[in-house]
């Protein structure tokens, strides 16, 4: 098994949570979401992000609005819906529980 494949699968598993968390702070254009994910070392390309944004929108967790751009075509800005905020709260609780459990299992014994 290749380490890079495992690392990529771990990142993919938390992308939804991270995207919702980014949008919980403020609405964002997809390139801003990608920049925030890259800044956090969660490398993502547009081909990964757009289908995920569509799925989250179709699940009524996100909404979007169009805004004219001074340097090109109109931009689509995404934000959380009320259902998205509730879903994010539930994911945050699950993340905290998972993080606690994994830390407990993986921490090195104290000598």
Image: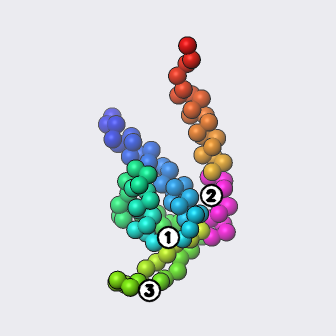
Picture mark count: 3
Give the CA separation, mark 3 to mark 1: 14 Å
Tell me if residue 89 comes above or below residue 83 in the rendering: above
Q: Which residues are magenta?
A: 81-91
Q: Are marks 1 and 2 in contact (CB under 8 Å)?
A: no
Q: Residue 49, how many percent across, how many down?
A: 42, 63
Tell me if residue 104 comes above or below residue 23 in the rendering: above
Give the CA separation, mark 1 to mark 2: 16 Å
The mark closer to the camera, 1 or 2, is: 1
Tag of residue 68:
3
In the rendered structure, which disc, 3 or 2, sits on the residue that comes first in sequence?
3
Tag of residue 28:
1
Q: Considering the numbered disc 1 on the image, is that residue within a helix, a strand or a loop?
A: loop
Q: Considering the numbered disc 2 on the image, is that residue within a helix, a strand or a loop?
A: helix
Please say whether residue 61 is visible from this viewpoint. no
Image quarter in which the C terminus is found: top right
Q: Residue 13, how many percent across, how many down?
A: 48, 49
Q: Residue at x 61, y 34 (%)?
A: 101
Which residue is disc 2 drawn over?
Answer: 88
Give the CA separation, mark 3 to mark 2: 29 Å
Is residue 54 rendered to the left or right of residue 95? left
Q: Residue 12, how many percent across, how many down?
A: 44, 51
Q: Residue 18, how many percent across, how many down?
A: 52, 55
Q: Residue at x 67, y 69 (%)?
A: 82
Q: Considering the numbered disc 3 on the image, is that residue within a helix, a strand or a loop?
A: strand
């Amino acid at each position: 098994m290749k380490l890079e494949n495992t690392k990529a699968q771990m990142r993919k598993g938390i992308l939804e949570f991270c995207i919702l968390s980014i949008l919980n702070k403020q609405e964002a254009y997809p390139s801003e979401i990608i920049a925030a994910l890259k800044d956090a070392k969660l490398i993502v390309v547009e081909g990964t992000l757009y289908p995920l944004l569509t799925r989250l929108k179709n699940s009524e967790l996100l909404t979007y609005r169009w805004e004219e751009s001074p340097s090109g075509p109109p931009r689509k800005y995404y934000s959380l819906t009320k259902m998205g905020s509730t879903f994010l709260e539930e994911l945050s609780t699950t993340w905290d529980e998972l993080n606690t459990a994994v830390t407990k299992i993986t921490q090195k014994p104290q000598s």
